[in-house]
Amino acid sequence: EAQVTQNPRYLITVTGKKLTVTCSQNMNHEYMSWYRQDPGLGLRQIYYSMNVEVTDKGDVPEGYKVSRKEKRNFPLILESPSPNQTSLYFCASRVTGGAYEQYFGPGTRLTVT
Amino acid sequence: GESVGLHLPTLSVQEGDNSIINCAYSNSASDYFIWYKQESGKGPQFIIDIRSNMDKRQGQRVTVLLNKTVKHLSLQIAATQPGDSAVYFCAEMTGSNYKLTFGKGTLLTVNP
């Protein structure tokens, strides 16, 4: 089954404790992206990657890091989480070239206390 | 900055009625638009898309209309069913980095 998977699905952590949210896709997509979803603000892009070893900032990159060492994986790293990073996070992927949909993962609910 | 917005944050319809969800966009350079459905606890799910060189596209029970003159996008759902209850987002794509800009969403509630 073609899908985007994320782990963990739920995470409660404390301020300053480094964490990583993993994202993997099995569709051989070149493009991957991370979004956060907050009430009243909708979905906002954090980082994206056009291909392996190619990443760039989205609209709200502060406090986040990403890496793209393999085509299928695109982890989101919070080096020192803060309460304002409490949010619902989605990973997405798509093919490059032309108008094609993005496929979204099931989401990761992060709470930083 | 430019953004995608929605006219109605909530929409309540009776089962069997047709639903229309509207979206206004402000970036005239956007060349691709998508409607997503998001059910509680799930990620956005693709419904239908349309390119800027089209003004209408039909899927199964859904139709998307694009009016570039007034920068307006709409999603029509025919014979709305309880399973259609969800938040619906429009999104626009601009430029070569495939970035999607999302609207805030409309909550559709279907009453049996």
Image (cartoon, coloured by chain):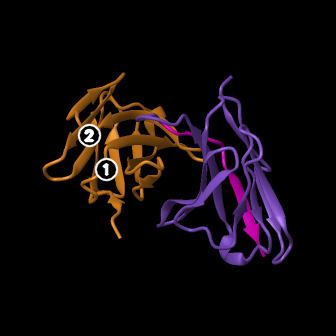
Chain colours: A purple, B orange
- Determine the residue positioned at 34% across, 47% down: B12
Q: Circle 1: is it few (<14), some (14-19), or many (20+) Cα within 10 Å?
A: some
The foreground one among B7 and B2 is B2
Q: Which mark, residue B52?
A: 2
Q: Which residues are magenta?
A: A101-113
Q: Secondary structure at mark 1?
A: loop
Where residue A85 sits: x, y (%)?
Answer: 68, 71
Kindly identify which numbered label has been placed on residue B10: none
* Relative horizontal placement of residue A68, taking residue A50 as reference (left or right): right
Residue designated by label 1: B30
The quarter holding residue B10 reads bottom left
For the residue carrying disc 2, how many other residues have a C-alpha within 10 Å: few (<14), some (14-19), or many (20+)?
A: some
Residue B99 in the image: state x and y as whole percent.
Answer: 47, 51
Where is residue A17? Give x, y as percent: 86, 72
The quadrant the C terminus of chain B occupies is: top left
Residue B89 in picture, x, y percent from top left:
42, 48
Task: Give the residue at the far left of this rendering.
Answer: B69
What is the secondary structure assignment of the residue under circle 2? Answer: loop
> Could you tell me which residue is drawn at 66 percent across and 76 percent down?
A84
> Tag 2 or tag 1, which sits nearer the N-term?
1
Compared across the picture, whether B3 is left or right of A9 comes to left
Question: Looking at this view, is B53 or B84 the one in front?
Answer: B53
Residues B73 and A80: in front is A80
Q: CA distance from mark 1 to mark 2?
A: 7 Å
Question: Can residue A34 be seen in the rendering of this structure?
Answer: no
Above or below residue A33? Residue A44 is below
Closest to the observer: B83 or A15? A15
Taking the image as shown, residue B103 lies to the left or right of residue B67, namely right
Residue B107 left/right relative to B8: right
Q: Quadrant of residue B65?
A: top left
| Residue A111 in view, yes or no | yes
